Amino acid sequence: MGSSKTIQVTITNTGSTNVLLKQENLSGDMYTASGITPPISIAPGAHVVMSITFQPTKAGPASGNVLLTGGFVSVAMASYSLSGTGVAAKAPLQASPGSVQFGNVTVGTKISQSVQLKNPGTGSATISSVSVSGGGFSTSGLTLPVTLAAGGTKNLTLTFAPTAIGAGSGTITLKSSSGAPELTLNVSGTGLTGTRTISAWPASLNFGNAAIGSSEKLAVTLKNNGNSNLTISGVSVTGLGVSSISTGLSGSTIAPGQTATLNVTFAPKSVWLTAKMSGSVKISSNATNSPTVITLNGTAVSATGHSTGAAHSVLLSWSPSSSSGVVGYNVYRASPGTAYILVYSAMNGLNCTDGTVQSGQTYTYVVTAVNSAGEESAESGSATAVVP
């Protein structure tokens, strides 16, 4: 159904005089005849060719007849019985999903999606070629020609790798072994400018007091805020000659929106070191805002609990925040007549020690909760410490 088949017949005058074909009578509503237009005269030994076409409009057997009459008394000169069977058309290939929208993709990167092809017909279907239109689109996964049995499936991988900024669209056309299109898929996507920016939280680390021979470890969360992969090329520490970094970040890649953790350890080794020390960690990457610098502060304390440069410290503790998404806390300190300054950032834990206080001073402390984006809550209630 929906197609046609034509058979040609040759009618020859085998007599010795001209034959006159006066009329053509055709029965059967799915048949047509062409090639001759009566009345027509056929000389002795000559012939004409008539074409009969069967074009079914419904399934099932169909019969018909062609009768050619001629002569002076209109006798039957030639007669053909016609027969054929209409069958339901084989459905073309089906695809799931029927179209693919890749969305926003950064120029210089690519994204792929698998499409399942299915042959819903009762016979096999052969895919002999796949053609692609539209910039940045491509296919893989099929070794052509490929034949799908009735009900069979195959997977086709579609890829969008934009080379220009802006929206684009195209088509994927699969053709059969006869050259007829079996399936057309519409594809679309938008190329975006690549961005790479990195953020670090907290931006400074205050280790407080660390006893000689022990160590204090704090963590920094790095986040790729851009839309392209970000590569860490190096991590180094300067100053605070007793700090170390524990990470496998150098040479690693952070995907867009993803985070990585950098651990920094303060481990004073000698009582002869200066009590109050500072330094920084530099993180180099292919981000537009590289390098990222984390400032470090810490105080070396003797194993007996006395600082090498200060005799007092303030131990602070607080209750956990009831808000969701909290990943750490910032501790701020103020003395009379001064503004609050950040003295400690805690990724985990609910206490810290401020070993930078001075004898005879009064200090006020507040705490804020921080989420993974570095956003802080309102300040907690304050607490006051009087140092003897």
Image (spheres, rainbow, N blue to C red):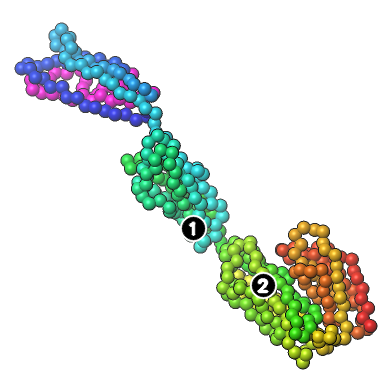
Q: Is residue 58 left or right of residue 320?
A: left
Q: Position of residue 213 (x, y in %)?
A: 75, 85
The residue lying toward the viewer, choosing from 342 and 33, is 342
What residue do we see at 65% from left, 76% from top? 246
Whether residue 13 is visible to the viewer of this picture, yes or no, is yes
**In this picture, is 342 found above or below 375?**
below
What residue occupies the far top of the structure in this picture? 73
Which residue is label 2 attached to?
A: 262
Residue 386 highlighted magenta (yes or no) = no
Which secondary structure lies at badge 2? strand
Quadrant for the N terminus, please. Answer: top left
Q: Which of the two marks, 2 or 1, is nearer to us in this view?
A: 2
Q: Position of residue 26 (x, y in %)?
A: 27, 16
Q: Amino acid at mark 1?
A: Ala
Q: Position of residue 276 (x, y in %)?
A: 79, 85
Mark seen at residue 255: none
